[in-house]
Image (cartoon, rainbow, N blue to C red):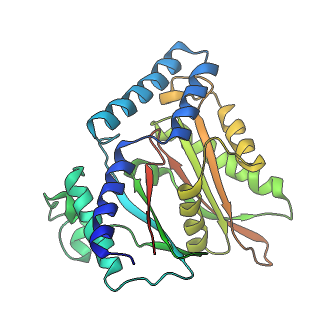
């Protein structure tokens, strides 16, 4: 039986962990990048990112000053009885996690027009920051798995969702993705980046698939498409912090969804920064 008090507490702890801890595959990817790097400047940057992550985990400090917007990915078992108040408990857990971290105050005050212009200023409390709409998926079993991801603002500036005329060619679509990634990486600054792509039938679906790719991607398990994109963008030589070197992209995560009979594929790209994906998960046993 899933207890909502446990849901709130675990959600808060997971948010803090997502914001402060590198996962094993992330650490391994950085160490691999350091080993193959020849540029002393790039090697210095990569080693400092690893040191930053070590200190963040030891002291439970945010990995980045831009503590990010909570994005939640839920996998709900077919046989799970979701208790009344579950989503409210998740929201309470997110707010508690933002206070514990603490998150950077970023929530904008005011009505629709005032929030757009930001003329009323910001709320001082970190927990005033609303989480993004939750993505859910159906999975076998009785449990609920929650993945919390913290999305920083810088990568959103370089993101892109657009149709690609595929011309019945996989290469056409991949080459467009490589071009987007190469252009965006040069402008991002917080390199090495993580390229995340969703390919779907609509703008909404492509973006949702990109979020799923972010939630499930593994730096040590790269498909042929993912490796091809990573290798091609790394050939740009932009390197860590744009100082040159072999690692402009630490890894690429791609999720391809159902497609429709059409001349286009809708592709959504997010360029995660050097700390992405800031991600952690927890399990609620049903």
Q: Residue furthest front?
A: 1
Could you tell me which residue is drawn at 59 percent across and 52 percent down?
A: 217
Displayed quadrant of residue 65: top left
Q: Is residue 65 visible?
A: yes
Q: How many marks?
A: 0
Please say if 171 is above or below 251.
Answer: below
Could you tell me which residue is drawn at 67 percent across and 40 percent down?
A: 230
Measured as percent of width and height from the top left, residue 195 is found at 59, 47
Q: Is residue 104 visible?
A: no
55 left or right, relative to 252: left
113 left or right, relative to 209: left
Please say if 75 is above or below 240.
Answer: below
Q: Residue furthest right?
A: 168
Measured as percent of width and height from the top left, residue 271 is found at 53, 48
The N terminus sits in image quarter = bottom left
153 left or right, relative to 185: left
In the image, 81 versus 88, the foreground residue is 81
Measured as percent of width and height from the top left, residue 57 is found at 34, 37
Could you tell me which residue is drawn at 72 percent across and 67 percent down?
A: 265
In the image, 5 versus 34, the foreground residue is 5
Displayed quadrant of residue 98: bottom left
Could you tell me which residue is drawn at 59 percent across and 58 percent down?
A: 213
In the image, 4 versus 229, the foreground residue is 4
């Amino acid at each position: 039986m899933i207890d909502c008090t446990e849901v709130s507490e675990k959600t808060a702890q997971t948010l803090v962990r997502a914001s402060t801890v590198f996962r094993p595959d992330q650490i391994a990817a950085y160490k691999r990048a350091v080993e193959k790097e020849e540029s002393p400047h790039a090697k210095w940057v990569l080693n400092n990112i690893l040191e930053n992550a070590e200190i963040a985990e030891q002291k439970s400090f945010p990995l980045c000053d831009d503590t990010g917007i909570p994005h939640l990915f839920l996998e709900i078992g077919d046989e799970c009885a979701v208790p009344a108040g579950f989503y409210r408990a998740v929201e309470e857990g997110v707010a508690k996690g933002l206070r514990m971290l603490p998150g950077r105050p970023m929530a904008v005050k005011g009505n629709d027009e005032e929030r757009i212009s930001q003329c009323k200023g910001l709320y001082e409390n970190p927990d005033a920051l609303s989480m993004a709409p939750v993505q859910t998926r159906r999975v076998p079993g009785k449990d609920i798995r929650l993945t919390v991801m913290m999305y920083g603002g810088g990568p959103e500036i370089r993101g892109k969702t657009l149709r690609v005329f595929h011309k019945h060619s996989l290469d056409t679509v991949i080459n467009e993705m490589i071009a987007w990634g190469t252009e965006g990486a040069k402008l991002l600054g917080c390199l090495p980046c993580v390229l995340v792509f969703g390919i779907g039938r609509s703008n909404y679906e492509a973006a949702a698939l990109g979020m799923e790719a972010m939630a499930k991607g593994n730096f040590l398990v790269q498909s042929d498409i993912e490796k091809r994109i990573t290798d091609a963008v790394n050939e740009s030589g932009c390197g860590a912090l744009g100082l040159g070197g072999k690692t402009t992209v630490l890894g690429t995560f791609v999720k391809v969804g159902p497609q429709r009979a059409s001349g286009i594929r809708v592709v959504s790209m997010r360029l995660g920064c050097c700390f992405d994906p800031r991600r952690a998960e927890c399990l609620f046993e049903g």
